[in-house]
Image (cartoon, rainbow, N blue to C red):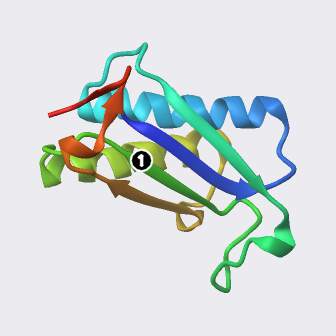
């Protein structure tokens, strides 16, 4: 059950945002084997003046945070980062340098679903 948050500069059309979320979801399915229905994603749009980035980043720059259950191998996480980035480059022409991905893995006891603690 990965939770995805995308911070990006405000102003993209609905079709772009939908394709962006599709790229991330497909990357998750292909690299770590989540079920296709397991889709918990959100986009947070930020005004350009409120989104500070390193020099050389474009208005396509985004931070993708993926929070998921712990336990996947370093190789699976590497595949996830590479697959999502490749899909964004291919489908939306986003430069790889504009894709910043962070994977968070809170311990099982830090997850609560349907009123129950996991683990």
Q: Name which residue lies at 87% across and 50% down.
A: 11
Residue lying farthest front? 115
Residue lying farthest top? 37
Q: Residues within 10 Å of mark 1 (few under 14, many from 20)?
A: some
Q: Is residue 56 above or below residue 67?
A: below
Q: How many marks?
A: 1
**Does dot 1 land on a helix, a strand or a loop?**
strand
Position in image of residue 78 (x %, y %): 25, 53
Residue lying farthest bottom? 55
Position in image of residue 75 (x %, y %): 15, 50
Q: Name which residue lies at 32% across and 28% down.
A: 30
Looking at the rendered image, the quarter that the N terminus falls into is top left
Residue 38 or residue 53, whichever sits in front:
38
* Direction from residue 32 to residue 46 in the image, left or right: right
Looking at the rendered image, the quarter that the C terminus falls into is top left
Q: Indicate the quadrant where residue 88 lies.
A: top right
Position in image of residue 56 (x %, y %): 67, 81
Q: Which residue is mark 1?
A: 66
Q: Indicate the quadrant where residue 41 lies.
A: top right
Q: Is residue 111 above or below residue 39?
A: below
* Direction from residue 101 to residue 118 in the image, left or right: left
Q: Name which residue lies at 66% across and 78% down.
A: 53
Position in image of residue 34 (x %, y %): 30, 24
């Amino acid at each position: 059950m990965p939770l995805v948050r995308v911070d990006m500069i405000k102003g993209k059309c609905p079709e772009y945002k939908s394709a962006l979320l599709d790229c991330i979801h497909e990357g998750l399915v292909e690299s770590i084997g989540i079920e296709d229905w397991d889709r918990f994603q959100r986009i947070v749009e930020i005004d350009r003046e409120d989104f500070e980035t390193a020099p050389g980043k474009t208005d396509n720059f985004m931070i993708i945070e993926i929070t998921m259950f712990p336990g996947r191998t370093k190789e699976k996480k590497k595949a996830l980062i590479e697959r999502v980035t490749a899909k964004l480059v291919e489908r939306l022409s986003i430069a790889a340098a504009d894709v910043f991905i962070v994977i968070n893995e809170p311990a099982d006891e830090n997850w609560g679903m349907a009123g129950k603690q996991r683990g």
